[in-house]
Image (spheres, rainbow, N blue to C red):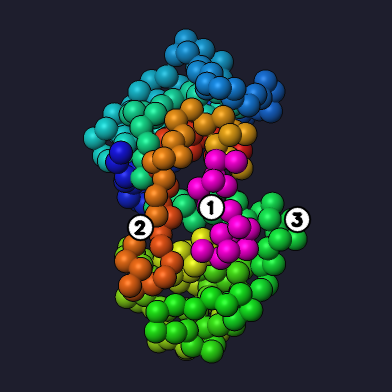
Amino acid sequence: MRPVRFAPVRALLLLLILVACVPAGAQTETDVVFPGTEWDEVSRGDLAGYGWSDDALQRTSAFIRDSANTTGLVVVDRGRVVFDYGDVSELSYLASVRKSILAMLYGSWVENGVVDLDATLDELGVDDEGGLLDIERRATVRDLITARSGVYHAASNGGDDLANAPERGSKQPGSYMLYNNWDFNAAGAVFEQLTGRNLYDEVQSQLATPLQFEDWSRSAQRKSGNLEISRNPAYHMWISTRDMARIGYLM
């Protein structure tokens, strides 16, 4: 299992290349499907009928191989795969994407009234090693999932922008966005506290099962982090490229 690696500038270049592969007006709402247990694939001979250039897609493949440094890519048009690259069935380590998936999981629990996005950390009894400041305790669940809590406590895992954080207690909750793993990890812990459900079980019940993931492995999912630094572990996920495409197509 390998992490997905994709530099932002290279990702933008790839997106521009893929857009250039599709003639203007080619994408319509006709013949739209949702995948069954397996993705349907558009054959190379039928690509033109979908508005795609086979030659351009082959050049895209070469660009990915030589410049993009990504392990897997799937392009879906109207519910069918028109292009893929790499081993799209391999379970890949997801880091930043996990936060967006968690935000999706929150939705039904907010709708049914179990989760109040305006509940504060103080009301929920959320604390951490060394304690939180009074101003930090006023942050809400909404602030956590939008990375605007104003809590600049160290997270149990690195890889965020804490080094550039303002001084603790200097920002009102909700007023300042920082890419902050403490927020993301706390959002996961609060989700489990309020719903009584394991986060990975919710990925399975809300996404993997109804969307018919082909490669989902519940046993591959595991939390990590130094809990002596922060009580909230990171909840990285392992999902294949073609199953991530199902989430993307849903959205």
Q: Is residue 227 visible?
A: yes
Marks 3/1 in contact by CB < 8 Å: the verdict is no
The answer to whether 111 is drawn above or below residue 40 in the figure is below
Q: Is residue 222 left or right of residue 150?
A: left
Please, what secondary structure does the residue beneath circle 3 have?
A: loop
Question: Which residue of the protein is positioned furthest toward the top in this rendering?
Answer: 45
Q: Measured from the top left, where is residue 126 in percent x and y?
A: 54, 76
Front-most of residues 137 and 170: 137
Q: Residue at x 57, y 47 (%)?
A: 202
The answer to whether 62 is drawn above or below residue 166 in the figure is above
Q: Measured from the top left, where is residue 11 in percent x and y?
A: 38, 45
Residue 116 quadrant: bottom right
Q: CA distance from mark 2 to mark 1?
A: 15 Å
Q: Which residues are magenta?
A: 189-205
Mark 3 vs mark 1: give the one in front. Answer: 1
Amino acid at circle 1: Asn
Residue 226 quadrant: bottom left
Residue occupied by mark 3: 112
Amino acid at circle 3: Asn
Please, what secondary structure does the residue beneath circle 2 have?
A: loop
Q: Which mark is residue 35?
A: none
Residue 209 quadrant: top right
Sequence-wise first label, 2 or 1: 1
Front-most of residues 6 and 132: 132
Question: Which residue of the protein is positioned furthest toward the front in this rendering?
Answer: 196
What is the quadrant of the C terminus in the image?
top right
Residue occupied by mark 1: 198
Q: Is residue 20 visible?
A: no
